[in-house]
Amino acid sequence: MDMSAEYLYSIGGMFGPSVVMDGEIWRLFTAMFLHGGAEHIIMNMLSLYIVGRSVEMLFSKVAYLGIYFVSGLVGGLASIYFHPVSVGVGASGAIFGVFGALAGFALVHYKRMHDEFISFMRGFGIILVLNLVIGLVFPSVDLSAHIAGLVVGVIGGIFVAKFPKGIWLYVAIMTLLMVLFYNYLPVLYVNPSDVLFK
């Protein structure tokens, strides 16, 4: 069933003024485990099942989780930047990070993969185009979170493919960038009327 923005906010949904102005950073994390309805969670879990199994075979558990959560958090920050007064929920940024990690890994090993690489990139392109179309058709879909998660995931996939034990360095670099970006976000709320949601 569909849930109101107020209800999603009350159970931990992401809302820019709360995250940025009130310091409720935890909402970036909790929002990744909330969904706006049955269709939302079914689509996300189906996507995670399809792509996640391949990533589980190629990456360590630590690398998988590191890329997943970094992508989700960056996706959340991007969502706040582009939609500063909207309530956001969902794991799409994190899931697109998993997509991106697989693409990054394939880019590093494309010579070894040969025909598999071409087939993978074709399928990957179709999935991206479909998601772009869905994002343009349904205004509730946050493409900014998808794209940010995807980019961070590609970087993570390339990094881990080249330095399998370097996941902690990737997480540390991304955390530093997130902190810097988070400290920039208050400029979005110079108008007091922007924070009247609560």
Image (tube, rainbow, N blue to C red):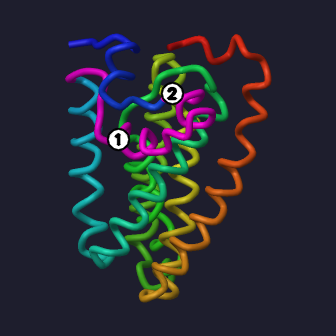
Please state the extent of the stretch shown in magenta in the rendering.
Answer: 15-38
* Residue lying at the far front of the rendered structure: 22
Could you classify mark 2 by the number of other residues whose Cα lies within 10 Å: few (under 14), some (14-19), or many (20 or more)? many
Which residue shows up at 21% across the image and 51% down it?
49
Which residue shows up at 29% across the image and 27% down it? 40
Q: Which secondary structure lies at badge 1?
A: helix
- Viewer-nearest residue: 23 or 16: 23
Which quadrant is the N terminus positioned in? Answer: top left
State whether residue 23 is above or below residue 138: below
Q: Amino acid at mark 1?
A: Thr
Q: Residue at x 50, y 60 (%)?
A: 153
At 66% from the left edge and 35% from the top edge, which residue is drawn? 81
**Front in this rendered view, residue 131 or 176:** 176
Q: Is residue 47 left or right of residue 120?
A: left
Q: Are marks 2 and 1 in contact (CB under 8 Å)?
A: no
The residue beneath circle 1 is 30
The amino acid on which the numbered mark 2 sits, given as a three-letter code, is: Phe
